[in-house]
Amino acid sequence: MHLDVLDLRNFYYRTQLGRVAQRAIRDQVVRLWPPKQGETVVGFGFAVPLLRPYLPEARRVIGLMPGPQGVMPWPAGMENVSVLCEDTAWPVPTGLVDRLVLMHGLETSENPSSVLEEAHRVLGPGGRALFIVPNRGGLWSRRDETPFGYGRPYSVAQLEAQLKRHGFTPERNCSVLFAPPLSTRFWLRSADFWEGFGRKMPWLAGGVLMVEASKQVYAPTQGGLRAAVKKPLRVLEGVGQGAAEPALSRE
């Protein structure tokens, strides 16, 4: 079940642990996808804390928030771009999106297949989707004090298998939130150190998984023979025809 939008807002914007998590995840998203001019960037679930760096350059930024979660105006002090929607019907035209970020939208949904179908539909050719979910092997999925302690945690293999079943091609993956989900001063002040340390240690399990995927696009199939033979071989000409009768000799 989706979390309440007020609980998500309070965590990411009003707690020190939430601001640390927001910064770590957002910095990794920007590292993977530097802002580019003219792109359409969309977030689903509660991805708006990650989208602010794209506001100056993007052609369009949209924050989709599912109905069971609720919606809040975003960004603060600017024209609202957040929209309330259903998991099964996003108010976005087919093929419009260049960059799609899902956070607190897949693992908490009662219809994850519908979420992936809509994600596949709205993504344009050459577009990329970034799925951010709790790591099954991490500490953050084991504590209810953070939003990552709710819903279905994933391993990389589980998430990639689900994406492939819905027409996505996983491209790369990484993890973030290597510091434990504790609000004590020591862990909060050393969070940046642990993020840098964790990126250098691929065996270390972060609290959150990120899988980047592209949309599979199949070439249309057409019937009939496409290539015409300009100079056909004449070796078999005459096969199957009756042999010519010999001419009568004159006596």
Image: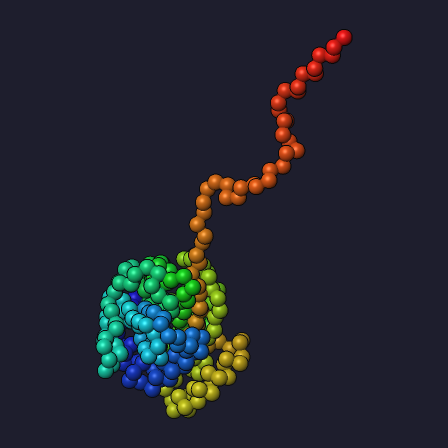
Residue 78, located in which quarter of the rendered image?
bottom left
Q: How is the rendered protein coloured?
A: rainbow
Relative horizontal placement of residue 198, taking residue 108 as reference (left or right):
right
Residue 203 relative to residue 239: left or right: left
- Which image quadrant: the N terminus? bottom left
Q: Is 240 placed left or right of 122 in the picture?
A: right
Give the left or right position of residue 56, taking residue 161 as reference. Answer: left
Residue 94 vertical position relative to residue 60 in the rendered view, above or below: above
Q: Which residue is rendered at x = 66% and y = 20% of the image?
A: 243
Given residues 97 and 71, the one toward you in this image is 97
Q: How many marks?
A: 0
Taking the spot 23% from the left edge, 72% from the top edge, the residue there is 71
Could you tell me residue 228's position as x and y percent?
A: 53, 41
- Where is residue 34, by image quadrant? bottom left
In the image, what residue occupies the spot 70% across and 16% down? 246
Q: Position of residue 82 (x, y in %)?
A: 25, 72
Q: Say which residue appears at 53% left-offset and 81% top-offset.
A: 200
Establish if 35 lies above or below 165: below
Image location of residue 239, percent across then percent down: 63, 27
In the rendered image, the residue lying farthest to the top is 251
Asked if residue 68 can be seen in this view, the reply is no
Quadrant for the C terminus, please. top right
Could you tell me residue 202's position as x and y percent?
A: 53, 76
